[in-house]
Image (cartoon, grey):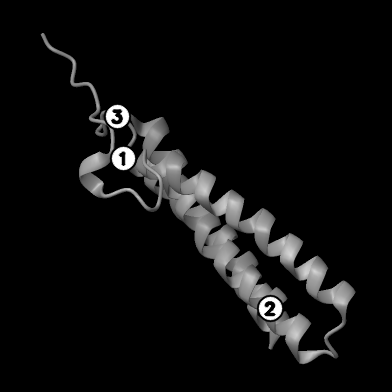
Amino acid sequence: MATVLDGIGVAAVVLGLAVAAVRAVRFWGSSSDPYRQFRQDIGRGILLGLEFLVAADIIRTVAVRPTLDGVLVLGLIVLIRTFLSMALQVELEGRWPWQSRDAAPAQQVPRD
């Protein structure tokens, strides 16, 4: 099961990259900031993939005979991936996960 989840996680990242590339080519010039949209699309794919990879690590550690070393390694992996997920969410949404949407900084709108 863990191997299947690993595969799904990798597929989510690759598919997210492909979808981001297609959307970037398709909407190039029509979006106000195509580079930012491209980065956000890639970030969403990475976040989804990370969730599956963390689940696979948890299953792998619990399904096999749990040892203190295995649990410590799992804790470190989950900590690193959680940090990456939070950093990506801040990059995508401009706010911390625990902040309300109203607390996000307003984006500057250029005036003519």
Q: Position of residue 100 (x, y in %)?
A: 26, 50
Question: Could you tell me which secondary element the residue under label 2 belongs to?
Answer: helix
Viewer-nearest residue: 88 or 45: 88
Residues packed near mark 1 inside 10 Å, few (<14), some (14 to 19) or many (20 plus): few
Residue at numbered disc 2: 58
Q: Is residue 100 left or right of residue 51?
A: left
Residue at numbered disc 1: 27
Residue 73 in which image quadrant? bottom right
Q: Where is residue 28 in the image (x, y as percent from the top left)?
A: 34, 34
Residues packed near mark 2 inside 10 Å, few (<14), some (14 to 19) or many (20 plus): some
Residue 95 in which image quadrant? top left
Mark 3 vs mark 2, CA separation in Å: 43 Å
Residue at numbered disc 3: 29
The answer to whether residue 57 is above or below residue 107 is: below
Amino acid type at image mark 2: Ile
Amino acid type at image mark 3: Gly
Viewer-nearest residue: 38 or 26: 38
Viewer-nearest residue: 110 or 20: 110
